[in-house]
Image: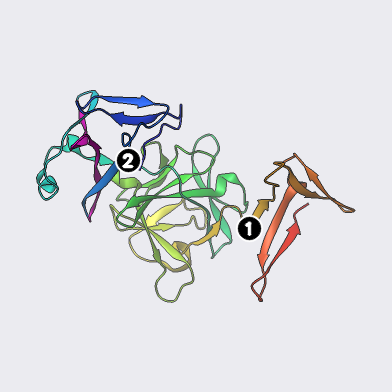
Amino acid sequence: FRLQSRVHGKFLLSDVNGQICTSDCIPNDQGQWKLIKKSPDIFSFLIYTTCGKNQRQLSCEGDGVNTILMQEQDQWYQYSNPSYFWDIELLSGELCFLSSPGQDRRLSCHPWSGRLSMSSNWKGWEVWRFIEAGNDHVRISNWTHQKKFLCSDSDGTVWTSNNHLGSWEMWKVERAPNGYNGVVLKSVSHGRFLKAAVNGSPVSTSPTFDGFSTTWHTDAGHRQSFYISSVCQGKRIGSSESQVYITSNRKAKEVWEIKQQSDGSVSLRSKA
C-alpha cells in the first residue's frame, strides 16, 4: 500500500540509507509499504518497505522518523522496542443514531458543553460515529463534535471526553440478551452496560443488563435519505409539487428517501 498525506497529497518514501522524505510521485518501487500485525490480540503493526535488496522498517526515535534494516521475518516478533511498532487509528466509521426503544429517544450530545441527554430529535447532535479500534472494540464519537468521545468510569458515570486513546473510551457492541431486540454497548474497561437516562436520572452505565434501559437500536445516520447527483454534471434531482428538475442546490427539496420493496426493487420518495 501507499502512505499519502491528506493535507498536501505527497507520498511517504524511504531511501536505502533510511532517510524519510515525501514526494509528489512514487519512483519505481519506492513508496510501497507493507504491514505485519504484532499479534492477533494487539492492534499494532510493523510498517516496512523494500529499498534495493533490503527491507527497511519504519522506526520512531525521539522526535525523528527513519527506517532501519529489518531482521528476518521469522525473527521480527522478538522485537520488544516499541519504536518499531505503529498503531493505525481509523478516522472513519459507521454513522448511527442510538435510540432507546423503551422511550423512543436518542442519545444526544449538547452542541457546546458535550453534555449527554436523551432527545426526541433525529438531528446531527444525535448521530454517533462507530470507529473500529481492534479486537472487536469501538470508539464512539459524536458526528457534529468529532473530538467528543463517549467515556465511562467504574462508578457508572458517563460523559464525553476529548481523549480518544484511553481505555475508558473503548466499547463493545453485542446483541442484547434475553430475547430483547437490539444491542448493548458494554464498557471494555469496566464491563458495564450503557444505560439510557430514565425518570430524570442521567445517562450512565449499569453493572448488569437492565432490560429496555440498557438496550439500544442503531439506525443509519442518513436514515435512508440521499442526494441523487449526475456524475457528468454534478447536479442533483430535485422535486416540487408540480415538477422534477435538475439543480446545483443541496437543500431539502433535493433529498430522496430510498425504500426497499418486497420484490427486491427500491422506491424513491421525495422528502420535499
Tell me the quarter of the picture where residue 247 sits. Answer: top right
By secondary structure, the bulk of the magenta-drawn segment is best described as strand
Q: Residue furthest right?
A: 242
Q: Position of residue 251 (x, y in %)?
A: 73, 43
The residue at which mark 2 appears reads as: 165
Q: Secondary structure at mark 1?
A: loop
Does the magenta portion include 60? Answer: yes
Q: Earlier in the sequence, mark 1 or mark 2?
A: 2
The quarter of the rendered structure image containing the N terminus is top left
Contact between labelled residues 2 and 1, with CB atoms less than 8 Å apart: no
C-alpha gap between disc 1 and disc 2:
31 Å
Q: What scheme was used to colour the molecule?
A: rainbow
Residue nearer the viewer, 252 or 107: 252
Residue nearer the viewer, 9 or 216: 9
Which mark identifies residue 267?
A: none
Q: Position of residue 108 (x, y in %)?
A: 53, 48
- Foreground tag (1 vs 2): 1
Q: Position of residue 190 (x, y in %)?
A: 28, 54
Q: Is residue 192 left or right of residue 267?
A: left
Question: What's drawn in magenta, residue-wise?
Answer: 40-61
Residue nearer the viewer, 94 or 208: 94
The residue at which mark 1 appears reads as: 224
Q: Secondary structure at mark 2?
A: loop
Does the magenta portion include 79? Answer: no
Residue nearer the viewer, 114 or 255: 255
Q: Position of residue 180 (x, y in %)?
A: 46, 73
What amino acid is at disc 1?
A: Gln
Query: Label 2 neighbourhood size at 10 Å, few (<14), some (14-19), many (20+)?
Result: few
Query: Label 1 neighbourhood size at 10 Å, few (<14), some (14-19), many (20+)?
Result: few
What amino acid is at disc 2?
A: Leu
> Image point 48% across, 39% down: which residue?
146
